[in-house]
Amino acid sequence: MTKVLSPLAVELASARSSLSFYKSEVQYLAAKVKMERIDAKLAKTDARLAKRAVAIAKAQARLDRLMAPVGSKAIKANKKPSRAKTTKFAAVVTELETATA
């Protein structure tokens, strides 16, 4: 013999089953949102680490260029010019020019 339920009891049973479905749906969506936040945080961290690696590589390249051995031409170009020396020949030529003038 089957139990006959009143329309109100059927509606109550239906509401309880839909309530359990929506609770599980809410739990699923909450977990999905949490995973999205974690993924975004990891992506942000990866981007920051990549940016830091690029900056370190750039600074290392600059340091390597500064520490590189300097060529002989660069050393000569960087020296201060020495004081001009007057030779005897130059002094004689200057005297002859003044005497003839």
Image: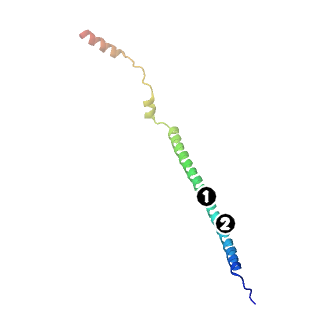
Q: Residue furthest bottom?
A: 1
Q: Give residue 5's quadrant in the image.
A: bottom right
Q: Point out the image quarter for the C terminus.
A: top left
Secondary structure state at the residue bearing disc 2:
helix
Mark drawn on residue 27: 2
* Residue at numbered disc 1: 37
The location of residue 36, given as percent across then percent down, is 60, 60
Of residue 68 and residue 56, the one placed in the foreground of this image is 56
Residue drawn 53% across the image and 38% down it: 67
Mark positioned earlier in the residue sequence (2 or 1): 2
Closest to the camera, between mark 2 and mark 1, is 2
Q: Is residue 41 above or below residue 73?
A: below
Q: Give residue 40's quadrant in the image.
A: bottom right
**Other residues around mark 2 within 10 Å, as few (<14) / some (14–19) / many (≥20):** few
Q: Is residue 4 above or below residue 90?
A: below
Residue drawn 27% across the image and 13% down it: 97
- Relative to 81, 46 lies left or right: right
Spatial separation of the CA atoms under disc 2 and disc 1: 16 Å
Q: Is residue 5 above or below residue 86?
A: below
Residue drawn 46% across the image and 32% down it: 75
Query: What amino acid is found at the position of numbered circle 1 in the picture?
Result: Arg
Secondary structure state at the residue bearing disc 1:
helix
**Other residues around mark 1 within 10 Å, as few (<14) / some (14–19) / many (≥20):** few
Query: What amino acid is found at the position of numbered circle 2 in the picture?
Result: Gln
